[in-house]
C-alpha cells in the first residue's frame, strides 16, 4: 500500500508510461507486431513497477493499472478490532472482521 508521497511518485511514472505507450501506438499503428507492442509496454511500465517494489517490497508480478488502486487515502482508517484498512473513508463496517466502525471523534 502506498502513502500519498509514494503514490505521487508511482502515479507520475505511470502517467508518463501511459503517454509513451499511447504515442508509440499512434506512431506504429498497424506497423508493428503484437509482440513488439507488448515489449514496448513492458519496457515503459518497468520503472513504475520498480518504484512500487522499492516502496512496498512487493515482488509478485502485477498489472500496472492495479497499482493505481494501492493508495492508502482511498481507504478508510484501520479497523479498531483487526487493524485492516476500512474499504472506504466513509465505511461503517469492516469487511474483514465485520466490526462496526468506532464512532469518530
Ligand atoms: Zn476489522
Image: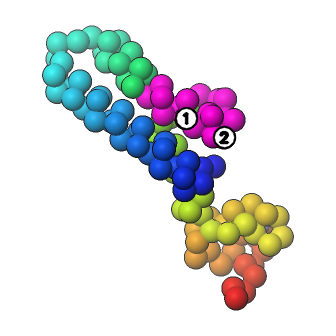
Q: Is residue 55 magenta?
A: yes
Residue 1 percent coordinates (x, y): 63, 49
Location of residue 23 (image quadrant):
top left
**First in sequence: mark 1 vs mark 2:** 1
Looking at the rendering, the stretch of residues picked out in magenta corresponds to 45-61
Q: Quadrant of the C terminus?
A: bottom right
For residue 70, say whether it is visible.
no
Position of 63 with respect to 102 (left or right) is left
Q: At x 39% / y 15%, what residue is drawn?
A: 39
Residue of label 1: 51
Position of 34 with respect to 43 (left or right) is left
> Within the displayed image, which quadrant is ligand 1 positioned in?
bottom right
For residue 41, say whether it is visible.
yes
Q: Is residue 74 magenta?
A: no
Q: At x 48% / y 25%, what residue is drawn?
A: 46
Residue 12 percent coordinates (x, y): 41, 43
Query: Which residue is situated farthest in the right direction here?
Result: 81
Q: Is residue 85 above or below residue 54?
A: below
Q: At x 54% / y 52%, what residue is drawn?
A: 5
Residue 10 percent coordinates (x, y): 49, 42
Position of 62 with respect to 78 (left or right) is left
Residue 68 percent coordinates (x, y): 48, 47
Disc tally is 2
Element class at badge 2: helix
Residue 56, disc: 2
Amino acid at each position: 500500500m502506498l502513502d500519498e508521497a509514494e503514490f505521487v511518485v508511482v502515479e507520475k511514472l505511470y502517467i508518463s508510461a501511459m503517454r509513451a505507450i499511447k504515442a508509440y501506438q499512434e506512431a506504429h499503428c498497424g506497423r508493428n507486431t503484437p509482440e513488439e507492442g507488448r515489449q514496448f509496454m513492458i519496457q515503459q511500465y518497468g520503472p513504475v513497477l520498480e518504484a512500487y517494489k522499492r516502496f512496498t517490497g512487493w515482488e509478485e508480478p502485477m498489472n500496472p493499472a492495479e497499482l493505481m488502486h494501492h493508495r492508502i487515502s482511498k481507504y478508510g482508517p484501520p479497523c479498531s478490532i483487526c487493524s485492516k484498512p476500512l474499504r472506504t473513508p466513509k465505511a461503517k463496517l469492516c469487511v474483514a472482521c465485520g466490526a462496526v466502525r468506532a464512532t469518530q471523534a
